[in-house]
Every structure is written in structure tokens, then in C-alpha cells.
Amino acid sequence: MAHIELNNDLPGIRGLMAYRPETEAPLNFLAEILLRDDNNTLSRGERELIGAYVSYLNDCFFCQNVHGAMAGHYLGCNVDEIDRIKQDFQTAELDDKMKALLSIAASVQKGGKNVTSEQIENARENGATDVEIHDTVLIAAAFCMFNRYVDGLATWAPADRQFYINRAPQRAVEGYQSSVYK
Amino acid sequence: MPHIDLPEEYPGIRSLFVYQPETAAPLCHLAQVLLHDPHPTLTAGERELIASYVSNLNTCKFCTATHSAIAKHQLGSDLSLVKHVLADPETAPISDKLRALLKIAAKVQTGGKNVLSEDIETARSEGATDIEIHDTVLIAAAFCMYNRYVDGLATWQPDNEAFYDKMGEQRAREGYKPSSINFTLTEELKKS
């Protein structure tokens, strides 16, 4: 049961967004630009994977399943493959640029000062641009917010992982700015 | 030196806002709603204290100095009160309700699951409402984002108390709407 009375039965962040529309607007606007806007050299699948991985590191069940399912939808992977990437991305079938960016995301999750110049250099050597590094840091930082928001108020989450997989294609079409009431 | 090619005349999160206006818009909007817009019960000063306290726990110099200065200007120009809250909320001269909310914020900073029912019960017994608890959790969570963004890209964070104080006075008055975030102060900083 959530720590506060949300007056709705929506799961995870959707219950919080319906409760407080004033903060819902900028939060969904941020998610839309970071994860779904197509004016970006990182694919939607790559950006969702960063969100899912950071949510896994923060042990947030709702967010890692929502965004793991979104990443799987865009990248054409099943949930087992996404789980394997989250558990050990270094040995997964990902390009070296993506591995370098996931390594930066993991450092951000621990704290901003953990990102080293060597990690940035490694990402650059593997073809990452400044904007891609910027977006990786901000996506990782944003999920350190979303995850704390969802777990800090003890929201409920469907236990059946298929629920998230089934919803992903619809969310991909509709985007995040319609995510509250549908 | 910043990890990426940021406009070098702007410090902290401002350099990131200038670098990427697309993400600056929702980030400023969120700060405006959480910290500055009228709230049913929490004052702007109380909300800035939560932001400053969490930024200090995350050891983010720019955000701590900025939001401490804003809190000071929201709370009768009393910087010693702000410093006392950051150092030890248990003994600071603040309400027991705010003390309980700061305790929740500190739990959020270490991870969402660390907020316990007992922490919520304590806040309620001191008079905290659901929306105050909600906003405390989201302010604390949001600063776990802003702090990581500012430090994760190694932005320039000057040691210049007068700069933060002047920016804090302006931000306390004008809020965070992108149109009000002009950069004349950073131009002055560059000259100094």
C-alpha cells in the first residue's frame, strides 16, 4: 500500500502522476524528450535500455520492467535478453559505444562525482558524441529521481512481468505525455 | 574541466541549460512547480531547505550553495539558520513537522525503499499532510537527479559566495521560469 492516499488504483508512477497533475506535466515532458523524441542520434531502444539498467541498479521493480519492456520492444529482444544485459552488459551483444555509455550510467547511479575522465574518453574513442554523453548522464540521473519517487512513496506494481511487455507497443505509439490515464 | 564541451562562461546547471535548451525547459518547469509556485501549506523557504539539505547530502557544491542562498532569501535573510539545518536538523530551530519531512528526504537520498512506514507516521503525527509528504519525496528525488546531472558532467562550480547570494536573491524573487533565468549574473561573474 502506498504511503499516502492516492485516490486511484493506477500502478507505479502513474498513480503518483494522477494524484499530482502539476508535477506530472514536467515529469512526462522530460521522459518524452529524453526517451522518445526522435531528434537524437541514440535510438529509442538504446535510451530505454539506459533507463531500464539504472532502474535495475536502483532495484525499482516497476521502472525496470516498464523500461525493460520498452527497450525490448524497440530493440527486438525478449525479456530474458534484456535481463541478461542488465545483469552483465559487458558480455552482452551490444556495441562498444553502448557499453561505454552504460558504464557511465552506472557511475552516475552511484553519484555524479563517480564519472571519470577515463570513462568519458573511452566513450569518445568508441564514437560517442558530447550530446550522447550528456543525454546518457541526464537519463541516468533522471531515473535516480523516478525510481526514488516510485519506491519512496511505496507505490504498488503488477507482479506479472507480462503486464509490462503487453503494454509496451501501445506506449511506444502514444508516448509518455498520455501515460497517466491510459 | 567539464567532461563535455559546455559554454565555459556559465557555471553549474546553467551551463547545461544553455547547452541543451530542450531538456532545460522541463527541468526548470519541475523546479518551478516543486519549489516556487504557491503551495497549499509548505512555504517556498521550507521547500528550498529540503532541496539544499539533499544537495548537501549528495555533496553537490553548486546546488547546495544556490539553494541555500535561495532559502536564506525566502527565510528572512538568515543564512545561519540554513547552515544549522544542513549541519544538524535535529537541533535546528525549525518546526517538528519540517524536521520529520527532512528525515524522509534523507531516506529518499539513500534510496526510495529506505522510507519506512514509521517515518511517514512520525511526519503525520507532527501534522504533515499527504501532499506535503508527496512533495518532500519528489523534491528529494528530483535533487538526486539535478545533483547527479551537475556533478556527472563535471560542470564549473565557482567558489564565490557573493555570486550565489546574488543569484539566490534573484531566484527567490523570480522563480525558475526559463524566461526569468537570464544570465546577466554570470556575465558579472566572468568579469569579476
Image: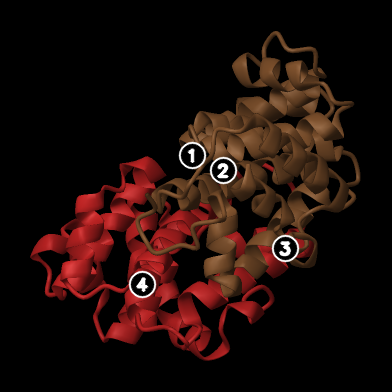
Chain colours: A red, B brown
Is the C-beta separation of discs 4 and 3 under 8 Å? no
Badge 2 element: helix
Is the C-beta separation of discs 4 and 1 under 8 Å? no
Look at discs 1 and 3 and give the one toward the viewer: 3
Position of residue B15 measured from the top left corner of the image (x, y, whole percent) = 54, 58
Same-subunit check for callouts 4 and 1: no
Badge 4 element: helix
Rounded to the nearest angstrom, the CA distance separating label 1 from label 2 is 6 Å
Label 2 crowding class (10 Å Cα cut-off): few <14, some 14-19, many 20+? many
Chain of the residue on which disc 4 is drawn:
A
Mark 3 lies on residue: B29
Q: Amino acid at mark 3?
A: His
Look at discs 4 and 3 and give the one toward the viewer: 4
Residue A82, quarter of the rendered image: bottom left
Residue A58 visible: no
Position of residue B31 measured from the top left corner of the image (x, y, whole percent) = 71, 54
Rounded to the nearest angstrom, the CA distance separating label 4 from label 2 is 29 Å
Mark 2 lies on residue: A152
Residue B139, quarter of the rendered image: top right
Is the C-beta separation of discs 1 and 2 under 8 Å? yes
Badge 3 element: helix
Mark 1 lies on residue: B113
Rounded to the nearest angstrom, the CA distance separating label 4 from label 3 is 23 Å
Which numbered circle lies on residue A132? 4
Q: Amino acid at mark 4?
A: Glu
Of labels 4 and 2, earlier in sequence is 4
Q: Residue at x 22, y 65 (%)?
A: A123
A162 vs B41, left or right, is: left
Rounded to the nearest angstrom, the CA distance separating label 4 from label 1 is 30 Å
Look at discs 4 and 2 and give the one toward the viewer: 4
Label 3 crowding class (10 Å Cα cut-off): few <14, some 14-19, many 20+? many
